[in-house]
Every structure is written in structure tokens, then in C-alpha cells.
Image (cartoon, rainbow, N blue to C red):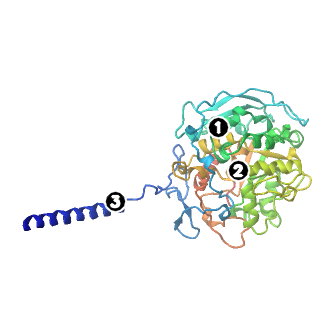
Amino acid sequence: MALQRRLVVVVVTASSLLCVYVLCVHLEKPPSWSTPPLKDAPGFSKAPGRSGSSAPQEPLRKETGGDRRTRPPPTAAAHPEVTAPPTAARHQPAEARDPGVSEAGSRYQGGDRAGTKGPPAPQRQQLIGGDGPTDPPFIGDTYKSEDVPPQTECRDGIRSRVKKTAFRGRFLEHIPVLQWAEDVTREQHQRLSRYPGAHGWGGIDYETLAETLSVLNASANRLLLDDWNHRGNASACSRCAVVGNGGILKESKAGEEIDGHHYVFRTNGAIVKGFERDVGSRTTHYTFSTNTLMNSLRSYAGFRGPPQSTETRYVFLPDHDRDFLLMKAAATHRAVERGRERAEDPTKYFGADVSAEKLKMYHPDFIRYLRNRFLRSSALKTKYKALYRPSTGAVMLLAALHSCDQVSAYGFMTPDYRKYSDHYYDKSYRPVGFFINHDLRMEMSLWQQLHQEGLIRLYGHR
């Protein structure tokens, strides 16, 4: 009996030690939710002379002034470009939605309801894009087609030159840049509701979409360069200056050169007053989302709101339903009906003389196309994929690339970006901050490639 009791004790003790060992080994394994570092996207060659090209992309926020990384901030207030996490509806994967969505595009004439003079209405055709299914499904590399007659007779414009470059396979000539009233149909709402945030209409009910986009019903709302007929002054090619807010513009003395273009694009916290010698004074197109506008007003001392002039157009980058609501309020000169900006007076942002013809809104197919074909970051393979999109400045520059004949880019990141403060109006040096919702290093590499291919002229400090 004594021997049996000793054997039982030995067996129990050995079993206990084995359990403890297994538990320790399990705890030493990395958690399944850990995020791998981002890498350069496939299909993008590294630009010669690019600094830091071998550095990993930040899957999490990189703290300025050091290499310590933390998770992205929980609220949008941390950075003008950081948006709140999508709603539960926006997280719904494409395959969980109606599998019977038709991929056949509608065909109709876009009438000029407001009577504004302009070129013939574009023909909406079948969907264009990928040759087969994409993986994962939310990528959605299929887009609506738009056949718009050329606005200029430029023989050496971007659209003709791109066919001779490495971008010819990515560039879709008939991608719609803007959305307007004629885009709202039940079929298109069903198709685009599969994609979240700026990439579709996910989380926006059909009634809200129809009542807000209905105010964009003039020819001016469907063309980025809507006034070219009287602005061109017999020029064969449209010349656009796209101005970012980068510190590289400080002491650049590029203001006169910028203002000499037919069109001048600006974005977010674009402070012009007091910096005219370096950045110019004109603004024909101001690109923003409601979120980035409100955050810019809170974050940047000296920024009092969007530029206001008779030639300024306001181009919304819709991230949420609040963009549609603010746009409708501005077009109707009424307070915002509901949502986070409820009761806000839109004229304090866009001026008392703002009209519906001066308002535009990027098409979700265009934003998704830019993400998929030009800036397909490895962030799309992380748990933060729903937060990722091209930066507002990147959308603005690539919209100009698809609309203008000649594009000059100022104030965008170059390989020597560490020499300059984050913004040209910073009173003291602030390093560039990196966030998961944008891949700024990939954008910098893209600007280098577009410059080398002769599709844009990128400003570098002289």
C-alpha cells in the first residue's frame, strides 16, 4: 500500500509539472492580433535616391521625435486626417451582403437640370476595371465608366503621355472623378454600399444619399474644371498647380509661379495670409472632408477656414454621411439638419455667396481606384484596413492628374523631408507624423515616379 501511495504522488506531481510547462510555452507565443510591419506595395519600383526606402512602413502611429510606436489614437482629434473607426455597418464584409448585386452598368443621358452651360452630358457606360475577382473582396477593383468629351485640344497632355509610361496599365481614362445627382440609383447604391468610408456608400442609407446629392444637379457639379471655356484664354492645355502644406515651401518664393497657373488647388489647413510670397494667394479648388476641416480649425493656429473667393470651388472628400449633410446645407444656405454638425451655419465656412454650382464631391469609385491602383498599401492586410485611404492631399493631386493637361505639385513630401517642418507655416520645427490611415512614404515614392515619368512636375527645394 505504501508503495502504491508513493507511485500516485509521483504521477500527480509529474502531471502538475507538465501542465505548468505547457502553460508557460503557450504564454511565450506572440498574440494572434499582433500587427506585422508594413512593406512596400507590390508593383511599385523604388524611386532612385529615395531615402529610407528600406524602412518598414508604420502599421501603428509613430510618435514624432522618436521611434516609439503606439496604437492609433482613439479619436479623430489627434490628427486632422485621422477619422473615427467605421460603424459596425461599415465593417460588414462584401461577401456578407447581397450576393445578387448586378455588375451591369446603367446607361443614361445626364441632363443639365440647373441650365448651366457646359459640354455635352457624359455617357455612363458599363463597369470597367479588373479582369477577374479580387482578393480580399472589399478591394473592389471594378468601377463605373464615364465618357466625357475632352475639354481642351491639348496634344501633349497627361492623358496622351501616360500611355507611353509605366502607369499605362493602371490609368483608367474613363473613371468618374466626381459624383453628382445622376449617380444616385438603387442599383448603384446597392453596388457601392459594399465598400466603407470614402471608398463607397457603406453606412449611408439611400434616402439620405438621394436627398443630399440631389442638389448637385448642374453641369458644373460633374466637372472638376467646370469653367475652362472662359478661363482658358485660348490656351490649348490646362495648367494646374496643386499645393500641399509641406514645410518645403517655406522661403521657396514660389508664390508668383503658383498663381500663374490656370487653376490652383489647396487642401485642409491651407493658410495663405502672410505666406503669399511662398505659396501664392489664389485658390480655385479647395479639397477637404468635414472631418479634416473641423480638425484643421482646431489644430492649426492661423487657419480661419477655407479660402473664399469668386473663383473658389469646394471639393468634398466624403468619409461619412456628415459630408453629404454639410454639402446640402451649403447648397441650400440652411443650417445642417442633423448629425455632429447639427445647426451649424455653412456660410461661416464657405461664405455668403456660395452656390450649389461651386460645390463638388469626389466619386467613391475614384477614391477606391486610387487606393487600389496607385496606393495599394500593405495596411490593407492589417486589422486597420478599414481606416486606410489615400491622404486628402494625395486625392487632390491625383484628381488633378486625371483632369488637367499639365500638373505642377508644390509642398508634397520629397526624400529629404526630414529637413523641413511638417507645414510651411509652423513657427518651430515639427517632424512629419505618420499614421495608419495613410501611407505617406508610399505617396512620396509615387510622386517621385510620376515626376520621373514626366506626368507631373514636382517642386524640390532650390
Q: SS at mark 2?
A: loop
Q: Using residue 316 as the reference point, say whether residue 84 is left or right of it.
A: left
> Label 3 belongs to which residue?
26
The disc labelled 1 sits on which kind of residue? Phe
> Label 1 belongs to which residue?
171
Query: Quarter of the image holding residue 252?
Result: bottom right
Taking the image as drawn, is residue 408 in sight?
A: yes
Q: Establish if 402 lies above or below 76.
A: above
Residue 352, percent from left and from top: 91, 55
Q: Using residue 37 as the reference point, say whether residue 81 is left or right of it.
A: right
Question: Mark 3 to mark 2: distance in Å?
Answer: 42 Å
Q: Going 69% across and 73% down the picture, which residue do you hit?
A: 428
Near-viewer residue (259 or 14): 14
Question: Mark 1 to mark 3: distance in Å?
Answer: 49 Å
Q: Establish if 247 lies above or below 354.
A: below
Say which label, 1 or 3, has the lower sequence index: 3
> Label 2 belongs to which residue?
320
Near-viewer residue (444 or 141): 141
Q: SS at mark 1?
A: loop
Q: Going 59% across and 68% down the picture, which residue do you hit?
A: 64
